[in-house]
Image (cartoon, rainbow, N blue to C red):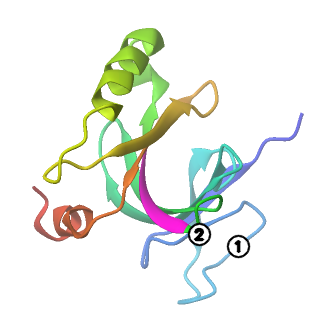
Amino acid sequence: MLIFLVKECFICGRCFGDHNLECDLDKAALNTTLLGLPLVKNRYRLDRRINTELIGATYLAYDIENKCKTTLKVILMEYLQSDFQKYSKVLEAIAQISHPNLISILDYGKNDEASFYIVMEHTLFMMLVKCTKI
């Protein structure tokens, strides 16, 4: 069984596959941060880490199918306390809500046995969170 790893540049935050050794932008050494490819569900390409939390990380991602930027949050399964179904039902309900002052949930699911992902519309607010650490 092949095991793939996501590597990140801790200087610029860009994401790479495990075959890369250094960032092609700033030549910094890459650090392994996630198990899996920098491609979620063969649809969302992880481009850059926006924020890191205790339970996971948030990335600027690109939706290959719809050709648009998204925000993708990876949550480690250990923090979901094995209650994947409960979180799925809550997210399904939240995804039905549409309001101009809310960030829409576009997709969610289990990425692998170790992580869960939530895809949200990408907005300027998500970048402000990184700058202000709200």
Q: Determine the secondary structure under disc 2.
A: strand
Earlier residue among tags 2 and 1: 1
Say the numbered circle drawn on residue 103.
none
- Which dot marks residue 30? 2
Q: Residues within 10 Å of mark 2 (few under 14, many from 20)?
A: many
Name the quadrant of the N terminus. top right
Query: Residue placed at 78% from the left, 65% from the top?
Result: 19
Give the amino acid at mark 2.
Leu
Query: Eyeballing the image, is 89 above or below 8?
Result: above
Q: Quadrant of residue 71?
A: bottom left
**Residue situated in front as seen by the camera: 28 or 102:** 102
Question: Residue 118 location, x and y as percent?
Answer: 43, 39
Identified by mark 1, the residue type is Leu
Asked if 96 appears above or below 19 in the picture, the reply is above
Q: CA distance from mark 2 to mark 1?
A: 6 Å
| Residue at left offset 63%, top offset 86% | 24
Q: In the image, 132: left or right of 79?
A: left
Q: Secondary structure at mark 1?
A: loop
- Residues shaded magenta: 68-73
Q: Could you tell me if residue 118 is visible in this image? A: no
Q: Which of the 4 quarters of the picture holds residue 132?
A: bottom left
Q: Position of residue 126 (x, y in %)?
A: 25, 62
Q: Which residue is labeled 1 in the image?
A: 21
Whole-percent x, y for residue 130 in the image: 22, 65
Q: Is residue 104 above or below residue 13?
A: above
Contact, mark 2 vs mark 1 (Cβ under 8 Å) = yes
In the image, is 12 to the left or to the right of 131? right
- x, y percentage for residue 65? 65, 58
Residue 91 at least partly seen = yes
